[in-house]
């Protein structure tokens, strides 16, 4: 009998130790798992919010676009380019004006090297409508150098 009692006490002692160990591990694991799930859920939500914010066209233009002063300079240069292209077209159509210009500046017309304008993809009505706007710009007109 005493052998069985000792055996039962030993088994009970081992089971109690194992139960205490399992309870301690669960007690430690539950907060860790809750924290891990909360951190993961928060991280996913933050990632979604950041992705959504970055996909906004206004925000994307602000983050990856040119500075405002560069955009303004680009607009001014495009207007100036349009004005110069239209001037070149007018000069090509009216050779008398070219001759008058060359005589008034004492230039030889054959010495003037002007590259052909790029082909325009705008219809003629849009070019005519844009002419008054280009004329109002304060962009300097290039001067031909006299000899």
Image (cartoon, rainbow, N blue to C red):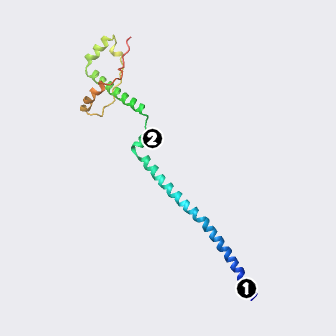
Residue at 26%, 17% (x, y): give it. Answer: 97
* Residue drawn at point x = 43 percent, y = 47 percent: 53
Please tell me how crowded label 2 is: few (under 14), some (14-19), or many (20+) other residues with Cα within 10 Å.
few
Name the mark nearer the viewer: 2 or 1. Answer: 1
Q: Position of 141 compared to 94: left or right? A: right
Front-lying residue, 32 or 70: 32
Calculate the distance from the C-alpha at mark 2 to the C-alpha at mark 1. 78 Å
In the rendered image, the residue lying farthest to the bottom is 1
On residue 5, the disc is 1
Under circle 1, the secondary element is helix
Please tell me how many numbered marks the rendered image carries.
2
Q: Earlier in the sequence, mark 2 or mark 1?
A: 1
User: Which quadrant of the rendered structure holds the C terminus?
Assistant: top left
Q: Which mark is residue 63?
A: 2
As drawn, the label of residue 57 is none
Residue 136 occupies quadrant:
top left
Q: Secondary structure at mark 2?
A: helix
């Amino acid at each position: 009998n005493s052998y069985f009692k000792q055996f039962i006490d030993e088994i009970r002692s081992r089971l109690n130790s194992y139960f205490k160990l399992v309870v301690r591990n669960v007690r430690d694991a539950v907060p860790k798992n809750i924290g891990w799930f909360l951190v993961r859920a928060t991280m996913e939500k933050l990632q979604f919010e950041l992705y959504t914010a970055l996909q906004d066209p206004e925000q994307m233009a602000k983050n990856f676009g040119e500075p405002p002063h560069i955009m303004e300079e680009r607009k001014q240069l495009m207007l100036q380019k349009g004005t110069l292209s239209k001037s070149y077209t007018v000069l090509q159509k009216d050779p008398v004006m070219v001759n008058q210009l060359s005589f008034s500046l004492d230039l030889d017309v054959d010495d003037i090297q002007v590259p052909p304008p790029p082909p325009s993809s705008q219809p003629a009505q849009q070019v005519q409508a844009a002419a008054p706007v280009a004329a109002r710009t304060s962009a300097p007109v290039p001067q031909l150098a006299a000899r």
